[in-house]
Amino acid sequence: MYHLRLGVNMYRVLLVDDNAIFRHSLHALVKSTPNWEVCGEAENGENAARLAEELRPDAVLVDLSMPGIGGVKATQEVRYRLPSTKIIVLSLHQSKQIAKTALEAGANAYVLKERADHDLIEALEAVLRNETYVSVMAEKRLAKSA
């Protein structure tokens, strides 16, 4: 699913994070990337699936740790309602089990928040190619915790 803007493929992203400052940073990062635009923002998991269904984004960036239903449940809900939408989980957690849980819930990618400025665009491009993406730093840290 993509949208055309002046003959250019434009991919739409929904941002879901309870931290407004982090959402603002993600928004700026996505906006600075050719062919990507932010179509909406949600501050919690409860609104994520509803807004995703309404906006039909190509990708959803979901914070793993949010009050309420949280990122895993939000991922499951978006995956259920929009099976072809790509989901990238952003997390502070470096636990192998937490990453595995997020991917099993339906995430297409797992990116550490501390590396989002380096890994996020690569993750977005990978999931559009139907690849699973785990940021290099997360892979290294997850391998150590195995």
Image (cartoon, rainbow, N blue to C red):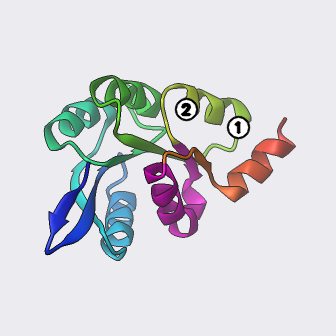
Q: Residue at x 54, y 56 (%)?
A: 113
Taking the image as shown, residue 101 lies to the left or right of residue 45, namely: right
**Callout in the foreground (1, 2):** 2
Taking the image as shown, residue 78 lies to the left or right of residue 142, namely: left
Identity, as a three-letter code, of the amino acid under mark 1: Ser
Taking the image as shown, residue 145 lies to the left or right of residue 133, namely: right
The residue wearing badge 1 is 95
- Magenta includes 13? no
**Tag of residue 102:** 2
Query: SS for tag 1?
Result: loop
Task: Report, in whole angstroms, how far the alpha carbon at label 1 lies from the one at label 2.
Answer: 11 Å
Nearer to the camera, 122 or 28: 122
Neighbours of disc 2 within 10 Å: few (<14), some (14-19), many (20+): many
Q: Quadrant of residue 9?
A: bottom left
Identity, as a three-letter code, of the amino acid under mark 2: Ala
Q: Is residue 68 visible?
A: no
Instruction: Tell me: residue 54, above or below residue 134.
Output: above
Kindly report the secondary structure that dominates the magenta region of the rendered protein: helix
Q: Earlier in the sequence, mark 1 or mark 2?
A: 1
Q: Quadrant of the C terminus?
A: top right
Q: Quadrant of residue 77?
A: top left
Q: Bounds of the magenta span?
A: 109-129
Query: SS for tag 2?
Result: helix
Q: Residue lying furthest front in this view?
A: 7
Q: Residue at x 82, y 43 (%)?
A: 143
Q: Residue 91, percent across and down?
A: 55, 46
